[in-house]
Image (tube, grey):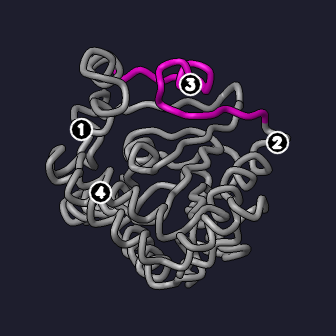
Amino acid sequence: MQSDNILMAVKDHIATVTINRPPANSWSLAALEDFEKALDAIEADQNIRVVVLTGAGEKCFSAGFDVSDAANAVKAGTMGQELWTRVDRFSKPIIAAINGHALGGGLELALSCHFRVMRDSPKAKVGLTELNLGIIPGWGGTQRMLRTVGRQKALDLILFSKRLTAAEALENGLVDYVFPPERFMDEVYAMAQTLAERPPIALRCVLNALTAGIYGGMEAGLAKEIEGSATVGASKDCIEGFTAFLEKRPPKFTGE
């Protein structure tokens, strides 16, 4: 799947999705529609086990909504929240490779991903800065910032529209890892490759159980955990995992 707005390449079970609207990599309605198609393709492709999401160029991961597409703001607002929630609930791990600024809807997207890795650039900042424009985070930012850093820190970051450096973002728990520019993508892909070598069915079941717990509460999460345990117990990957353990060799999971 390719478009002017979204680029996708697949190698070694890893799909790299690039927001291709530099320098800001902002989101128009058309870009959101193309992103939806990319998610559809990834979901349908059993060869893809992990997703790396990044922005074109070195200035921005994404600066949020494209204000030049204001005529489509209402529709884009609804679609943006729906798609970011889909990312949050995705059954394959998604790593946000934050290669530059992640502001507004761009940070909201990163917060939806399972992992966030940031390039340690002195100019790159992350923040939910919508209040500077007299609006609020509308693509899930209020809820996911709360979930990620807690109520008081979320209030501080959102109400004061604070912009954090990579080091500050790491300290506040907004990102999981920070790497220098010369190692950034190598480290991202090393992480993605490790995930790609994990048992795909078990990964999916864990993500589904966590998602169920977040959105439906502990009882829903526990029910999904029981369901996942039965699914993995009947898989060839389970047999391979135990066999490899007994034979003292690395397992080779096939997703069956």
- Name the mark on residue 170: 3
Label 2 to label 1, Cα distance in Å? 32 Å
Do the residues bearing badges 4 and 3 touch, measured as CB atoms within 8 Å? no
The question of residue 167 being in magenta is answered with: yes
Label 1 to label 3, Cα distance in Å? 19 Å
Q: Nearer the viewer, residue 96 or 12?
A: 12
Label 2 to label 3, Cα distance in Å? 17 Å
Do the residues bearing badges 2 and 3 touch, measured as CB atoms within 8 Å? no
- Where, by quadrant of the figure, is residue 81 drawn? bottom left
The question of residue 241 being in magenta is answered with: no
Say which label, 2 or 3, has the lower sequence index. Answer: 3
139 left or right of 100? left
Q: Nearer the viewer, mark 4 or mark 1?
A: 4
Locate residue 168, reporting x and y percent: 55, 19
Write the residue at 58% across / 76% down. 48
| Residue underneath mark 2 | 183
| Residue underneath mark 1 | 143
Kindly state the secondary structure of the residue where label 1 is placed. Answer: helix
Q: Residue furthest front?
A: 246
Q: Disc 3 residue type?
A: Leu
Where 40 falls versus 109 (above or below)? below
Label 4 to label 3, Cα distance in Å? 30 Å
Say which label, 4 or 2, has the lower sequence index. Answer: 2
Q: Is residue 70 visible?
A: no
Label 4 to label 1, Cα distance in Å? 24 Å
| Residue underneath mark 4 | 225
Q: Is residue 170 visible?
A: yes
Do the residues bearing badges 4 and 1 touch, measured as CB atoms within 8 Å? no
Q: What's drawn in magenta, residue-wise?
A: 161-180
Q: Disc 2 residue type?
A: Arg
Write the residue at 39% across / 49% down. 112
